[in-house]
Amino acid sequence: MSVLSPEAITVLMFGLLLFGIFLGYQIAFLLAGIGLFFGLGLFGISFLGSFTLNFLSVMKNYILLAIPLFVLMGSIMERSGAGERLFGSIYILSGRLPGGLAIATTLLATIFAACTGVVGASVVTMGVLSLPAMLKRGYDKRLASGLICAAGCLGVLIPPSIMIVIYGPVAGIPVGKLFMAAIGPGLCLSGVYILYILIRCLLDPHLGPPMSKEELRAIPRREKVRIVFSSLLPPIVIILAVLGSIFFGVAAPTEAAATGAFAAGGLSIFYKRFNVSMLGEAAESTLKTTSMILTMTAGAVFFVSTFMSIGGGEVVERVILGLPLGKWGIFFLMLLVVFILGMFLDWVAIVLLVVPLYTPIAAKLGFDAIWFATMIILNLQLSYITPPFALAAFYYRGIAPQEITMKDIYFSLLPFIALQIAVFVLCTLWPAIILWLPSQMGG
């Protein structure tokens, strides 16, 4: 094997990886196996020392401690009843508008994204809370389905996104900066979804009828104020405290995550949902999610260690930079590769494999590192709602009634894919959407 050129080994490693994926092997063990096979074959038993050092450097990364803490924060918030209370209070505020329930769902998804950072949990929670209410009031099933899937994916962008916590150390970019960079496009997407709902429901009120006058009168004004203040303010205060401490340089993401998890526990006590069973379920969910991410990380370390040692990074860099496409042509080609990979691989694997290759290429092309990273993350979010392998659609199908078919779900996603592409174009034309907040950070 040592007689092969770096170019041939690069093709072999990625070829075996794709072949293994199509055969259905677990990606984490596939990455580790290929990395070990080529590493030992090329460098001998002594290369195990390099594997060990690289693995330990990842495991000792302080920023990665934020993963279980942010996941725990989201798990507790999910089980504390905060979602139900938030939905009720937001609907009271927006219910009189055309498509009021759909608007409430979008706002809830935006706030919930800042509580969980996990797409699966957001899509399922939005579906369970808002779908029955929308169908009961005669909302169009495709409008409701597409919105829940798309809005549920905001957790990929809006901090504390677990994807960003992984991306930052891999790209050598401060996680706090990436958190702030993602807020602009995340809120932009949320705003575009709300605008789309308003316009469609104004043009055709049958798609999303507003709250009836009887419903509005059924809740006294004083009760409305009480519900809004008790249900809406506490989660928002927690979110602002976590993100504010990062923005002003008071705390690193790991400390902010610990504070958020502690505050989420306090909120569950305030809502009288805290008990040993709830805490155990939240801890178990956190353990499963964190184990999955760190197992994938460990497997990727084996693969990337070997790949970089043979000069694979330089091979990929030479090939991409040598293409006669120009700066922007290469940029969109890289995004296309990420988009296609998103159809077959988990985002953890894509980030760990692609980011070490793309980051130096983007730097040589003159792209701002934070802007480029956020565009990649935005592109990975799109893969969640793009058929045929739209993970958000699969999450949603699990809680949707039988009358909503996969065909309905796929068609419901099309306008939201177009809206996300529009926001992507906006972020390309006006990079300040991404870069303004990071430029204002303290510390």
Image (cartoon, helix red, strand yellow):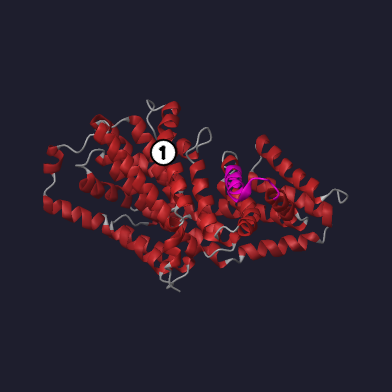
Check disc 1 and report the residue beneath it. Answer: 416
The reply, left or right, for residue 108 in relation to residue 355 is: left
Quarter holding the C terminus is bottom left
Which residues, given as a range, are shown in magenta? 322-338
Residue 64: image quadrant is bottom right
Identity of the amino acid at label 1? Phe
The reply, left or right, for residue 191 in relation to residue 28 is: left
Up/down of 172 relative to 149, above or below: below
The reply to whether residue 25 is in sight is yes
Return the x and y of residue 35 as percentages of the image width and height: 73, 51
Return the x and y of residue 314 as percentages of the image width and height: 73, 55
Q: How many labels does the image show?
A: 1
Please report the residue visible at 40 percent of the width from the left and 32 percent of the height from the top: 412
Q: Does the magenta stretch include residue 327?
A: yes
Q: Residues within 10 Å of mark 1 (few under 14, many from 20)?
A: many
Please report the residue visible at 55 percent of the width from the left and 60 percent of the height from the top: 369
For the stretch drawn in magenta, the main secondary structure is helix
The reply to whether residue 257 is in sight is no
Please report the residue visible at 56 percent of the width from the left and 47 percent of the height from the top: 347
Residue 167: image quadrant is bottom right
Among all residues in the image, which is located at the extreme right?
3
The reply, left or right, for residue 94 in relation to residue 117 is: left
Return the x and y of residue 86 as percentages of the image width and height: 28, 50
